[in-house]
Amino acid sequence: MMLTSLASNLISAWFSLLLPSYGTWKSLAHRPVSEPELERWAMYWAVMGAFIAFEHVAEWFVSWLPFYWEAKILVLLYLSLPQTQGSTWVFQMFVHPYLSKNEANIDASIAAAKANIVAFIQSRFATLLQSFVDAATKAAANAGAQPQGQSGAPPTSPIDMARGLWSAYGPALMNGLQAPAAAANHQRPVPPHAYSAASISSQSSGSSSAASSSYSSEPPAYPESEPYKI
């Protein structure tokens, strides 16, 4: 089924679209010599337009029929080949009589359809615009009826939102970043060269005072002489 559909589409595109497009260009490029040929191609495109419109609407319903793709190829070849002149016959026998008989009704239907479509689009657009206006008015009323504790309108710009976030979370973030640095500085050992001369002199004076305090100010007791024994 897929192979048949692909082959049918390729053949249809070549014989019913590409070759007629080239033939129409040749007729337009060599006017007024090819005026009958141009008329034939105009009939062909009128018939093909009706056929393609019917195909887009009803192909989903009839494509399951047996030998549908083969029949479609035969119909398109009959309409497009110059030897058969099928499009000219279909135009003169069916398309032209029908359009001539119903031309006024068709024109009125097209004009009514255009007017209805324009009116529908305008009404939908007006309804959508009114809904946007109502939403904006309601939002403005809600913003004006804020509690007194909340002053000013809520931040709407990205700069105001960023400023509010920094005011709320910035100090805590900076404290969290500074705490590890302070702890590291507290635990870091002081290098030997960091001691000042005053601290060294105070330490030396303290040691000398401790050494002097160990000596007593009173003279030591003189030992008593014992009697000489013979």
Image (spheres, helix red, strand yellow):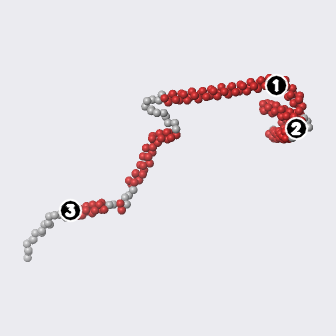
Closer mark to the observer between disc 3 and disc 2: 2
Vertical order, 169 against 126 (above or below): below
Q: Are marks 3 and 1 in contact (CB under 8 Å)?
A: no
Q: Please state which amino acid type lies under the numbered disc 3.
A: Ser
Mark 3–mark 2 distance (CA, rounded to whole Å): 138 Å
Q: Can residue 154 be seen in this view?
A: yes
Q: With 83 as the anchor, is 227 left or right in this view? A: left
Quarter of the image with the C terminus in it: bottom left
Query: Which residue is identified by label 3?
Result: 213
Question: If you read the primary sequence from the N terminus, does the residue marked by circle 3 or circle 1 appear first?
Answer: 1
Q: How crowded is mark 1: few (under 14 residues within 10 Å), some or many (20 or more)?
A: few
Q: Residues within 10 Å of mark 2 (few under 14, many from 20)?
A: few
Q: Is residue 65 visible?
A: no
Q: Position of residue 213 (x, y in %)?
A: 20, 62
**As rendered, which of 68 and 21 lies closer to the eye?**
21
Q: Please state which amino acid type lies under the numbered disc 2.
A: Pro
Query: Which residue is identified by label 2?
Result: 32
Q: How crowded is mark 3: few (under 14 residues within 10 Å), some or many (20 or more)?
A: few
Q: Are marks 3 and 2 in contact (CB under 8 Å)?
A: no
Closer mark to the observer between disc 1 and disc 2: 2
Q: Please state which amino acid type lies under the numbered disc 1.
A: Glu
Question: Which residue is farthest front?
Answer: 32
Q: Do the residues labelled 1 and 2 touch (CB within 8 Å)?
A: no
Which quarter of the figure has residue 200?
A: bottom left
Q: With 91 as the anchor, is 162 left or right in this view? A: left
Which quarter of the figure has residue 50?
A: top right
Query: Which residue is identified by label 1?
Result: 103
Question: If you read the primary sequence from the N terminus, does the residue marked by circle 1 or circle 2 appear first?
Answer: 2
